[in-house]
Amino acid sequence: MKITYQLIFMIFLLAGISLGVSSCKDDEATENEWNATYVYIQRNDYLILNNSTFTLKHSPVGVIGNVEITFKLKIQKPAAEDITGILQLSGTGDIPVSSFNLSTDSPVVKAGETESEDIVLSLSDKEALAQIHDLVSGEFKIQLVNLQTANSNTMISTNSALSAIAFSVTKQEYSINNLEIGEPENSHLMDRTSWYIQVEPGSQGNASNLIDGNAYSDVAQDNAGFWVTIDFQTPKTVTGIVTNHWGGAYCPTQIELFTSDNGLEWKTMGTIDVQGATQKIKLIAPVTTRHLKYQMLKFPARVDITEFNVYEAN
């Protein structure tokens, strides 16, 4: 009988161990990498190639260009609980990480959803960059470093391409030039009726010839260039200019453009080589100014302007 009780005890003990092992296996089956909720970050424009390199220009008006990346925190299936991702921005190089801003560093995927609202990384401190005249660059990374959630079996994606967003930024060396050949976008020709326009003394022709709409009247000079100044009467956002000339043989080949708030102290927008009977020049960065000055630097034996127009932002 004693042996019988011992046998029965052993049977129950083994049964208990077996049930325990089975229970552990069930728990492991419930929470493992195969059925986990994976959390990751992804750019909204992830299908576009070569979108991780940004180049900024540096002209007399400041740093021109932008750095902006829009992305979301995502999961591959809806979760029962909110999931908060913790983001960290890091970088190496000459451009400080503090130049950039994240709209949030703790985005949330709400319970029942599969993605957060838009998260935006942007360049927030151009003024600090404008103090650096040298060529500078940096490599940066937005990384998903941690999670806060009551949702079970939830983890950061093990795919490095989905747990971090890398980008690089280069600010070009400071250049005095803010001018390019071409017609500016999102602009129109300014109304000239209120202009006060002057030309360099000694030039042939009245300054009014430049804004009379008559292609057969002009201002000209022999063996010398001349300047033109315009007072718009009120500040205007200038995006470019266009000058007309009798022909290619009578047009300047290099000019300089200036702006001023008072008509006395002038700030150069740069110099540019030009050609042709119609010369369209755009400002790389639009400038708000009341006064504009145009100066010929290189020119033929006889040079002229028949019409002078200015583009302003729409």
Image (cartoon, grey):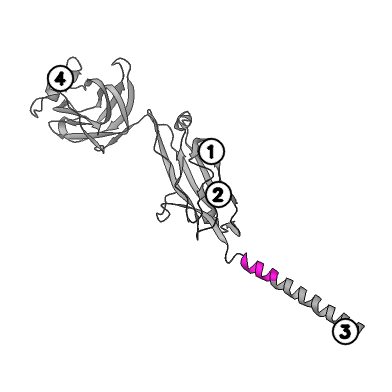
Q: How many marks?
A: 4
Residue under circle 2? 85
Residue 291 position by quadrant: top left
Label 4 sits on what residue type? Ala
Spot occupied by residue 175 in the image (x, y as percentages of width and height): 39, 31
Magenta part of the chain: 23-32
Residue under circle 1? 97
Compare marks 4 and 2 and give the one earlier in the sequence.
Answer: 2
Residue 123, visible in the rendered structure: yes
Label 1 sits on what residue type? Val
* Closer to viewer: mark 2 or mark 1: 2
**Is residue 129 found inside the magenta-colored segment of the image?**
no
Left/right of residue 292 with respect to residue 100 in the rendered view:
left
Find out whether the residues at labels 3 and 1 contact each other: C-beta distance under 8 Å. no
Residue under circle 4? 207
Gap in angstroms between the C-alphas marked 3 and 4:
124 Å
Spot occupied by residue 97 in the image (x, y as percentages of width and height): 53, 38
